[in-house]
Amino acid sequence: SQTIHQWPATLVQPVGSPLSLECTVEGTSNPNLYWYRQAAGRGLQLLFYSVGIGQISSEVPQNLSASRPQDRQFILSSKKLLLSDSGFYLCAWKPGGARNGYTFGSGTRLTVV
Amino acid sequence: GENVEQHPSTLSVQEGDSAVIKCTYSDSASNYFPWYKQELGKGPQLIIDIRSNVGEKKDQRIAVTLNKTAKHFSLHITETQPEDSAVYFCAASRGEGAQKLVFGQGTRLTINP
């Protein structure tokens, strides 16, 4: 069966520090991968998505970047965190080409101090 | 691009009563409409979805209806139970390409015993 792993679960980082959040999917190949951010009490905002290795599309210009170095690995990064980067970051996947809903990871709670 | 509006933002019902959450979408080309349930501190979980060639879908106490002409869809929960308390999100997407899901702002449902 397919599973999605996301870590770390919580993170407290100072302003100006770098960031790396990792997401991996098991039990499937060539998935579509997504990064969403959820601000406190708000909806889900799509940040990046990828339909294949090395293919990254950005939805919102900001202080973050994403990479997909391997088929089932999706990384969210920042060189210098801002206070406004605080939030709940969610990775999700779906079978490529299939019109299905996403499966979300358990999320990372990022607090920038 | 697609825009999804969700109402109400909060909903409180007595245990055993029904709850209804409504969403409207703007892109007439959207053809896939999932609903997610998010419990505190966790990632959203898919609970039911509907495609544009169907007007209604039911799964035990949960049902979703779709009105393509009016571009709105609704989630119905009958015989509510305390474990139904959570935040619910609707979403919409086109069926091609990266199939990006655009989410509503969420409804916090509270079931009062």
Image: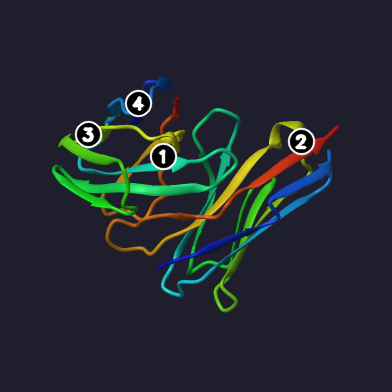
Sequence-wise, the earlier of marks 3 and 1 is 3
Q: Which residue is mark 2?
A: B81
Kind of residue at disc 1 = Thr
Q: Position of residue B26 (x, y in %)?
A: 50, 71
Q: Position of residue B81 (x, y in %)?
A: 76, 35
Secondary element type, mark 4: strand
Neighbour tally class for label 4: few under 14, some 14-19, many 20 plus, Cα within 10 Å: some
Kind of residue at disc 3 = Arg
Q: Position of residue A98 (x, y in %)?
A: 31, 53
Secondary element type, mark 2: loop
Sequence-wise, the earlier of marks 1 and 4 is 4
Q: Nearer the viewer, residue B99 or B49?
A: B99
Q: Which residue is mark 4?
A: A5
- Same chain for mark 2 and mark 4? The answer is no
Q: Which residue is mark 3?
A: A72
Secondary element type, mark 3: loop
Kind of residue at disc 2 = Gln
Q: CA distance from mark 1 to mark 2?
A: 24 Å
Left/right of residue A92 with respect to residue B90 in the rendered view: left
Sequence-wise, the earlier of marks 3 and 4 is 4
Q: Which residue is mark 1?
A: A103
Kind of residue at disc 4 = His
Q: Nearer the viewer, residue B76 or A92?
A: A92
